[in-house]
Amino acid sequence: MVDILHRVGIHASPNAVYKALTEIEPLSTWWTSDTTGETAVGGVIRFRFGERGFFDMKVLELDPEKRVLWEVVDGPKEWIGTKVSWDLSPEGAGTTIRFKQQGWREPVDFMHHCSTKWASFLFSLKAQLETGKGTPYPNDFLISIDFD
Amino acid sequence: MVDILHRVGIHASPNAVYKALTEIEPLSTWWTSDTTGETAVGGVIRFRFGERGFFDMKVLELDPEKRVLWEVVDGPKEWIGTKVSWDLSPEGAGTTIRFKQQGWREPVDFMHHCSTKWASFLFSLKAQLETGKGTPYPNDFLISIDFD
C-alpha cells in the first residue's frame, strides 16, 4: 500500500478552509466546477470532469475546522476504496492542511500523475482562498501531455 | 519505506529535459539559482537555498535523454540516503517525467511538505522549458506558512 501525501499552508482561517472542503459551492471553486451531491456524513459528493471522468466520494467523517474524510465509492478503478483525508490545523493567522490519499494498491503510473495533480489542485484551493481565483476544472492546470 | 512520486509532461524534447537535469546553468533556472558542483557520474551537485538550507546530490546514474539518479549525501537528516530518480520518455512532441524520491524512513510531516514542494518545482521546470520562465529559489512559490 502506498500513499499520496501533501502539506500546504493557506492564509485563510480553518473555518474558511473547512467550508471549501465541505460545501458544494466552495468545493466547486477549486476542484471541479461540476460538483453536486450531499455533503453530510454518509452522503456522496459527485465530482465531474466532463469527458475526462468523475469521482464519487462518500463522506465518512466531518470534524469542523479539523478533519474531513472521504472514501472513493466510484470513479477510476485504481481510486475505488481509497480514502482521502484532510487534516487542518491553525498556523499563525492561517491554516496548514495535511492531505493523504491512502489505500492505493500499487504505485502505478496513474498514481504518480494523481500525486502531482493533487498538488496542482491544492494550489488552486490556496489561490481561491487567498485571492478568490481558483482554477477548477475545466480551467485547471494541465500537468501532462497524455493524461488529463 | 515510503516514496514521493510525481509525473509531469513537458512540451520540450527529452534532450532539453535531460540538459535541465544534468547541467549546472539549466539546473539553476528551475530549482535554485545557487547551484554548483560536478555533474558527471560520481560528482556532487550542490543545491543551496540561502538560510533555508541545502541539498548535496551525488550523481549515481546518467543515461542521456532517459534517466538521472541522484543520492542525497548531505542536507536535512530526513533526506540523507534517499535517492531521487528522473525517468524520461518521449510523449508526442514532448517528454513525460516520472519522478521518485525513495528511501524516506517515515512519512513525517516534512515528507508531506517535500512532496508538495517537489510538485511546485516540477511545475517550475515545466514553465522554464515551455516559456523560459522558471521560478527557482529565491523566487520559488511558497507553499507553506511555517516551512520554507
Image (cartoon, coloured by chain):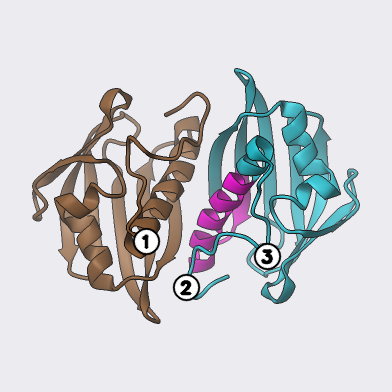
Chain colours: A cyan, B brown
Quarter that holds the C terminus of chain B: top left
Which residue type carries mark 3? Pro
Q: Could you say which disc has been placed on residue A145 in the image? A: 2
Classed neighbour count for the residue bearing mark 2: other residues with Cα under 10 Å, few (<14), some (14–19), many (≥20): some
Which residue type carries mark 1? Thr
Residue A114 is a magenta residue: yes
- The residue under the point 59% across, 57% down is A104
- For discs 1 and 2, the disc positioned in front in the rendered view: 1
Q: Report helix, strand or loop for mark 2.
A: loop
Residue B6, located in which quarter of the rendered image? bottom left
Is residue B71 left or right of B89 when viewed as pictured?
left
Dot 3 falls on which chain?
A
- The residue under the point 30% across, 50% down is B84
Dot 1 falls on which chain?
B
- The residue under the point 64% across, 35% down is A130
Is residue B35 left or right of B99 when viewed as pictured?
left
* Residue at mark 3 to residue at mark 1: CA–CA distance: 22 Å
**Relative depth, front residue between A47 and B127:** B127
Q: Which residue matches tag 1?
A: B131
Residue B92 is a magenta residue: no
- Above or below — where is B27 with respect to B10? above
Labelled pair 3, 2 in contact (Cβ < 8 Å): no
**Relative depth, front residue between B120 and A62:** B120
Image location (x, y in percent) of residue A42: 90, 48
* Residue at mark 1 to residue at mark 2: CA–CA distance: 16 Å
Q: Report helix, strand or loop for mark 1.
A: helix
Dot 2 falls on which chain?
A
Which residue type carries mark 2? Ile
The magenta-colored residue range is: A100-124
Q: Which residue matches tag 3?
A: A138
Image location (x, y in percent) of residue B39: 11, 52
